[in-house]
Amino acid sequence: MKRAALLAAAATTYAVAAWMVAPGFYDGFGPPQAYNWTCPPPQAGANIKPPSGRQVVKVLNGVSDANSAFTDDGQVVIGFLPGAFDATGKTAITVDITPLANCPQPPGIRFVTNVYRITADAPLVKPANLVLRYSNLLPDPSDVYFATDPVGAWKTIGRAQTAQPFTVDTTTREFGYFGAGYPSASPPPGVVTVGGGQTLPIVVAILIALVVVAGLPLALRRRRGASTDREGRPEDET
Amino acid sequence: MISALKTIHPARRAILVGAYVLLIEWSRALIQYEPHMAVAALVLGGAALTLVVVGWPAERLGLGTSRLGLRILGGLALGAVLLLPAAVRSAAVPVLPAGLAVAAVAVSIGEELAFRGALYAALDELGGAPLAIIGSTSLWTAAHAISHPPAFLGAVAAAGLLLALWRWACRDLVGPVIGHVVADLAL
């Protein structure tokens, strides 16, 4: 009885501790750090607003240096090859990454990251490598989307082979607005959708049902076995 | 090497097992976020953790086959408890990407065999159940200090304590293994 009480207390302690962090679980394969949201989903818990980033790329003999710009939290990294910019008449090129203050919801697209505006004071002449980190609180993105105006038309710029978990890689030849997501008309990529996106509650419900349905006969059999033992036991042993 | 491990003092054995498990867990955590290394780090890390049980009798690890039905049910119940807060908190949490499923199984089994299996048994031999429960939970929490944000460590410790208490109360490791695998596969 004491053991059962200790187990119940430990289960309660776990439930409270897990409830205090998003998504309410102790383990799993989440990103190494929590995602900073512009518009946090309900399950996100405490949230820090995403920071911006700035990088000054040097220009030597009319050729821009290899460099990368990134936000302070590493949620966006854009890398440039040598000579990636049209650096005519420049000694340095400034690249800015700014999270958009609102969260656009263009028709047909569901973003799973913040939308970032990336600008530079020189145009690109070679593709830049863009990496967006995403959260484990929303489905994985299938594509990176681009727009020159956040309230205008968005187009997919695809995604390359991902090097790290919870990041999506692509290349771009122009600056503008970027976000990762998936077509909202289709189910989230890589996710087995059962019961309209209620997968986890269904999994837990099935587990509980299995334990109850299979556990009751086992417990009854054990109790019957124990009472048979007691009845068959000589009195001096009880 | 295994026979040499058996003859050394229980305190040294517990320290060796603990140091080995921490080394593997921290190495795995550092390697898994390198480009293209996630699955390999998890699978190899899980396999390396599993090695720590070599030489231990199955009964000492809690891996007996008596009351197997109850052990399996206990594991499903543990899985439900571990997932319950996330299930209540959000109706639609993403499922683990399929590519990581095998890795999740490997590392879940490896962690249970290492922490609630060999480390628990070594600490139990040294100082009894209280040391085994507290010691295995402490090292489990420390092992996740690199791979998890600090805010998660309370939940990690509470999960470790629950699984270690199950190991003690039911003298069973099958339940924690199943519970851990189910929980990691679902999230």
Image (cartoon, rainbow, N blue to C red):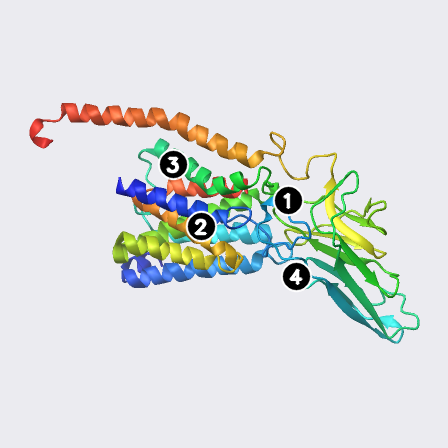
Q: Are marks 2 and 1 in contact (CB under 8 Å)?
A: no
Tag 3, which secondary structure? helix
In the drawing, what numbered circle is on residue B74?
3
Q: Are marks 4 and 2 in contact (CB under 8 Å)?
A: no
Q: What subunit carries mark 2?
A: B
Which mark lies nearer to you, 4 or 2? 4
Tag 4, which secondary structure? loop
- Residue in the image at 51% along x and 56% along y: B151
Is residue B165 or residue B30 the one in the foreground? B165
Is residue A50 or residue B178 the one in the foreground? A50
- For disc 2, the marked residue is B111
Q: Are marks 3 and 4 in contact (CB under 8 Å)?
A: no
Residues tagged by mark 2 and mark 3 found on one chain of the structure: yes
- For disc 1, the marked residue is A138
Q: CA distance from mark 4 to mark 2?
A: 30 Å
Residue B152 position within the rendered picture, expressed as x and y whole percent measured from the top left:
50, 54
Which mark is first along the chain, 1 or 4?
4
Using the rendered view, name the quadrant where residue B35 is placed: bottom right
Which mark is first along the chain, 3 or 2?
3
Q: CA distance from mark 2 to mark 3?
A: 18 Å
> Which quadrant of the figure contains the C terminus of chain A?
top left
Q: What subunit carries mark 4?
A: A
Residues tagged by mark 3 and mark 4 found on one chain of the structure: no
Q: CA distance from mark 3 to mark 1?
A: 30 Å
Mark 4 closeness class: few <14, some 14–19, many ≥20 residues within 10 Å: some
Q: Amino acid at mark 1?
A: Leu
- For disc 4, the marked residue is A73
